[in-house]
Amino acid sequence: MFFHPMDFLILIAFALSMWASFRVRGTFNKWSQVPIRSRMTGAEAARRMLDANGLYNVPVEAVPGTLTDHYDPTSRTVRLSEPVYFQNSVSAVSVACHEVGHAIQHQVHYPMLVARHRMFPIVNFASGVAPFLILAGFLIQQIPMLLTLGIIFFAAAVAFQLVTLPVEFNASSRARDEMIAQGFITNEEERGVAKVLNAAALTYVAAALISVLELLKYIMISNSRNNDN
């Protein structure tokens, strides 16, 4: 392995990713201190939003940790971190409704979510194999197919991250629309909701950017080797 010109961009993207992570926590903590006027907790907001969309059988559960919130498509369960589940803040309701947005996507068969679910088994295998193939490709240059296969598998993982972006943005959009339509938030609180959701989305953008740049780096290295041969 050696330092490649693309590594400069990757380092910048990595710095952006670190900044995005700090911003998510900072924004979440800031708006966690702002009680929502409707006085609903994250759990209550999630339950009301689920019921409003006919998802009566989707449970809402509390899980340990902070920012561990997620929607489990296998068991069709919305799981909220304890601060989100029990608090009645702008942050709590924003995050809770975002996760319900994924449940609604599942219900309506949102195309990008369907694609993501179908890709997962392949990507789960590919992301585990790709690093070893790429490393072997660098170490055993006499077998160029190793690097090529590593790039193909890594590309599958990158595609998964790119598909994740519209899924996350769409879930946030659904959450914001539902919160306004159902009167969960006031016009003044909408600004805080946008900040919380946008900060979270930025982490996905930064992660995808790093992966894309790394993929381009490997492709450039592979092409350079082929040209030398």
Image (spheres, helix red, strand yellow):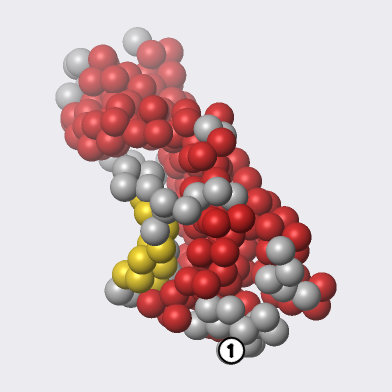
Left or right, residue 166 beside residue 37: left
Q: Position of residue 168 (x, y in %)?
A: 56, 49
Front in this rendered view, residue 46 or 145? 46
Coordinates of residue 81 in the picture (x, y in percent): 39, 71
Where does label 1 land, which residue? 33
Q: Residue furthest top?
A: 229
Give the residue at x 68% y 71%. 184
Q: Describe the element under mark 1 as helix, strand or loop.
A: loop
Residue 197, x across and y down, in percent: 62, 63
**Which image quarter: residue 117?**
top left
Relative to residue 65, is residue 142 drawn left or right? left
**Is 214 located above or below residue 90 in the figure?**
above
- 154 vs 174: above or below: above
Residue 65 can be seen, yes or no: yes
The residue sitting at 28% across, 36% down in the picture is: 124
Compared to residue 226, the image places residue 100 above or below, namely below
Q: Residue at x 51, y 64 (%)?
A: 47
Q: What amino acid does circle 1 point to? A: Gln
Q: Residue at x 28, y 40 (%)?
A: 1
x%, y% of residue 53?
Answer: 59, 50
The image quarter containing residue 215 is: top left
Q: Is residue 16 visible?
A: no
List the single residue furthest toward the right.
187
- Locate residue 93 relative to residue 229 in the image: left or right: right
In the displayed structure image, the side of residue 29 where residue 119 appears, left or right: left
Residue nearest the observer in this picture, 3 or 144 = 144
Q: How many marks?
A: 1
